[in-house]
Image (spheres, rainbow, N blue to C red):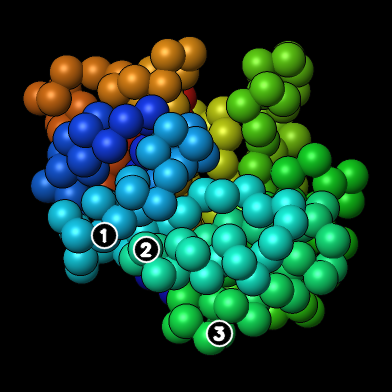
């Protein structure tokens, strides 16, 4: 599939999320993620607000569902989400419920394999259960607790291994440099995600740059992902 670029709106208010989403849309981003902090702070209202403001941009609701898979997926679908996220470590009934609700409401399910000891096996299990996408995720606390370079290398290794093991699209999230993030489609993971500490301040969960600087950065990322041969090295992180 062609690369898709998603912005992770791990912000705390609808106002901040809409403002940052507007910049990302102008820059050419494809998908908008209502991040977990935003859903915790604003709930269904955030998903609904994003969908109403940007009806042509699919909204990812990063619920990290661990229970009540059908109900949570149904609620987000009714609010305008095009995709919801279920954790692979949830009970199999939860994953099945999320997939069933997604089929009933015409949306998709992403499975996050964060903290799985065997991410390849988990990804294969999720694919067999009918999820549509796999997220290989180095979590916020995990990447701040572990030595950064070690954790980053593990994420790259896991993302490549999962992409080779499943037939559904894969995205890698957490701690990648921009250079690594924009290269993910060439490594088999075509869903590129940009969030903290670029679009979002890593510690404060607020917009991470002034509007002009953020838009210029995001436009450059879009250019590099959509035209990978024009990519140039960078040491910034995504």
What residue do we see at 75% from left, 17% from top?
146
Identify the element where label 2 is drawn: helix
- The reply to whether dot 3 and dot 2 touch (C-beta < 8 Å) is no
Q: To which residue does mark 1 refer?
A: 51
Identify the element where label 1 is drawn: helix
- The picture places residue 51, in percent across and down from the top left corner, at 26, 60
The residues tagged by marks 2 and 1 sit, at their Cα atoms, a distance apart of 8 Å
Question: Which tag, 2 or 1, sits closer to the chain's start?
Answer: 1
- The picture places residue 127, in percent across and down from the top left corner, at 73, 74
Question: Which tag, 1 or 3, sits closer to the chain's start?
Answer: 1
What residue do we see at 75% from left, 35% from top?
154
Viewer-nearest residue: 120 or 52:
52
- The reply to whether dot 2 and dot 1 touch (C-beta < 8 Å) is yes
Q: Residues within 10 Å of mark 1 (few under 14, many from 20)?
A: some
Compared to residue 210, the image places residue 28 above or below, namely below
Compared to residue 210, the image places residue 117 above or below, namely below
Q: Which mark is residue 79?
A: 2
Q: To which residue does mark 3 refer?
A: 103
What residue do we see at 37% from left, 63% from top?
79
The residues tagged by marks 1 and 3 sit, at their Cα atoms, a distance apart of 19 Å
Q: Is residue 165 left or right of residue 136?
A: right
Viewer-nearest residue: 33 or 143:
33
User: Mark 2 or 1, which is nearer the eye?
Assistant: 2
Where, quadrant-wise, is the N terminus in this rendering? bottom left
């Amino acid at each position: 599939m062609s690369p898709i670029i998603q912005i992770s709106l791990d912000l705390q208010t609808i106002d901040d999320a809409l403002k940052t989403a507007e910049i990302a849309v102008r820059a050419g981003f494809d998908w908008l993620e209502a991040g977990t902090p935003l859903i915790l702070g604003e709930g269904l209202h955030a998903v609904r607000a994003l969908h109403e403001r940007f009806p042509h941009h699919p909204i990812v609701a990063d619920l990290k569902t661990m229970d009540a898979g059908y109900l949570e997926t149904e609620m987000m679908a009714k609010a305008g989400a095009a995709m919801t996220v279920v954790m692979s470590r949830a009970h199999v009934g939860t994953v099945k419920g999320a997939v069933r609700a997604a089929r009933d409401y015409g949306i998709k399910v992403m499975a996050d394999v964060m903290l799985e000891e065997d991410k390849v096996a988990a990804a294969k299990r999720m694919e067999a259960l009918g999820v549509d996408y796999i997220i290989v995720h180095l979590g916020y606390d995990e990447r701040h607790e572990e030595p950064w370079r070690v954790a980053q290398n593990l994420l790259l290794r896991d993302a490549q291994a999962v992409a080779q093991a499943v037939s559904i699209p894969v995205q890698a999230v957490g701690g990648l440099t921009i250079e690594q993030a924009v290269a993910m489609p060439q490594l088999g993971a075509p869903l590129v995600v940009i969030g903290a500490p670029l679009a979002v301040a890593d510690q404060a969960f607020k917009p991470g740059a002034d509007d002009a600087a953020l838009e210029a950065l995001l436009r450059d990322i879009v250019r590099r992902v959509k035209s990978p041969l024009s990519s140039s090295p960078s040491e910034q992180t995504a």
